[in-house]
């Protein structure tokens, strides 16, 4: 995989949600799951298996990095952070989706208007 | 409590590397969210994850990349190595399935020749040779380290010999032309021998009904012929997969031969 952000697109829904959830702050796995559920009004619920499978891919691709936090009460909590490459990829994907959205609006408008 | 034990069991069935890295975190999430989400979706997710990790990611966990470049990109040599490894493993799996199919079809012929100890000996011999062909380098650690070394040394030469052996094994398994079979793999029985055996069996089956005064099992005849056609058609595909894997290994060998380039700033 190259360092070119465009080569990672399009992103799968799970990966997009994970990256967006990490855009604001570093989160642990459970935090990511909660944030994803919140973003989608509870419509998209990630399971731990799906989450960590995707996180492993993101770690390998360098879109996300693992960070250690001192003074955590639970040693099982590992935090994940969006890297600069990850940020660029998310921005590019959002731009791509905006384009898709615009196109959809243009093409779907006549159909909507034709309906009685 | 039962659902937690079942969840732990499902996690325990995951590949070791995945388990070591994520077991604690997944169990923690289970503990946190079982009240709100219920245990069934979480158990189902673990089950799907189990299938996913073994079916889709087994190769990844077996030869996990040890080095990731700072920019997140995998080193080219690492990519070539993984590609060669995956294709090699896939080719041998396919070879094994094809081989089992070939023996089943030979036994379906109900020809006395193929129920004899000779065939058993051939089957065992073929299995042992294929097992040798699938043999991995001495250890995963050595395998990874050797891919990273730049200066040739004894271990590097050994590694090169091992992957050359893999390449030759794949080619010998499916090549008919003696000139194309590497010298060190000439004695290899492989799939080509089974093809010859199948064709011989097919001819014997065709000759047998012509003999006067013999009762003939037409059901066996049609079973055998159908199996034979399927196997011979699939042989082309098997051959192609073997050649592709051999090519991938050759690419890795070529990459090993290339001198390391000093990085320009």
Image: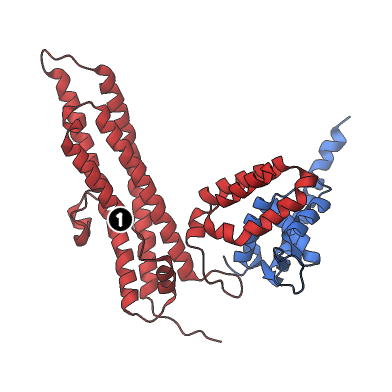
Residue B64 vs residue B234, the one in the foreground: B64
Q: Position of residue B226 (x, y in %)?
A: 32, 27
Q: Colour of chain B?
A: red
The residue lying at 72 percent from left, 64 percent from top is A77
B88 left or right, relative to A37: left
Q: Which chain is in blue here?
A: A
Q: Residue at x 76, y 50 (%)?
A: B33
Q: Is residue B82 above or below residue A114?
A: below
Secondary structure at numbered mark 1: helix
| Quadrant location, the N terminus of chain A | bottom right
Residue extending furthest toward the bottom: B265
A111 on left or right of B190: right
- Find residue A75 and report its horizontal and vertical position in percent: 71, 66
Asked where in the image residue B216 lies, by quadrant, the reply is top left
Residue A22 in which image quadrant? bottom right
Which residue is most to the right? A116
Residue B164: x and y, percent?
30, 64
Q: Residue at x 22, y 26 (%)?
A: B110
Pointer 1 residue: B133
Q: Is residue B227 above or below residue B92?
A: above
Q: Nearer the viewer, residue B38 or A41?
A: B38
- B10 in relation to A32, above or below: above
Return the chain for callout 1: B
Q: Is residue B138 above or below residue A42?
A: below
């Amino acid at each position: 995989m190259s360092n070119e952000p465009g080569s990672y697109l399009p992103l799968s829904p799970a990966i997009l949600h994970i990256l967006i959830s990490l855009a604001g702050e570093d989160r642990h796995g459970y935090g990511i799951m909660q944030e994803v559920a919140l973003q989608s009004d509870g419509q998209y619920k990630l399971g731990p298996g799906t989450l960590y499978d995707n996180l492993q891919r993101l770690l390998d691709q360098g879109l996300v990095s693992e960070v250690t936090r001192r003074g955590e009460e639970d040693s099982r909590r590992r935090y994940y952070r969006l890297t600069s490459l990850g940020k660029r990829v998310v921005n590019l994907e959002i731009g791509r989706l905006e384009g898709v959205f615009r196109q959809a609006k243009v093409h779907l408008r006549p159909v909507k208007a034709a309906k009685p | 409590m039962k659902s937690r034990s079942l969840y732990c069991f499902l996690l325990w069935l995951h590949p070791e590397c995945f388990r070591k890295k994520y077991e604690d975190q997944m169990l923690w999430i289970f503990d946190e969210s079982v009240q709100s989400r219920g245990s069934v979706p979480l158990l189902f997710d673990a089950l799907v994850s189990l299938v996913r990790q073994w079916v889709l990611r087994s190769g990844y966990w077996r030869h996990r990349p040890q080095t990731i470049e700072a920019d997140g990109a995998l080193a080219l040599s690492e990519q070539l190595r993984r590609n060669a490894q995956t294709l090699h493993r896939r080719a041998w799996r396919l070879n094994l399935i094809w081989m089992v199919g070939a023996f089943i079809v030979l036994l379906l012929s109900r020809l006395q020749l193929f129920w004899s100890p000779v065939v058993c000996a051939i089957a065992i011999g073929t299995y042992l040779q294929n097992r040798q062909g699938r043999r991995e380098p001495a250890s995963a650690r050595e395998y990874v380290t050797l891919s990273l070394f730049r200066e040739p040394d004894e271990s590097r030469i050994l590694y090169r010999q091992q992957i050359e052996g893999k390449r030759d094994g794949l080619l010998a398994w499916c090549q008919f032309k003696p000139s194309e079979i590497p010298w060190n793999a000439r004695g290899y029985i492989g799939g080509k021998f089974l093809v010859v055996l199948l064709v011989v069996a097919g001819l014997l089956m065709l000759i047998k009904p012509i003999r006067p005064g013999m009762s003939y099992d037409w059901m066996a005849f049609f079973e055998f012929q159908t199996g034979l056609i399927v196997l011979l058609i699939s042989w082309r595909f098997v051959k192609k997969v073997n050649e592709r894997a051999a090519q991938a290994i050759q690419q890795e060998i070529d990459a090993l031969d290339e001198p390391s380039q000093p990085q320009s700033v």
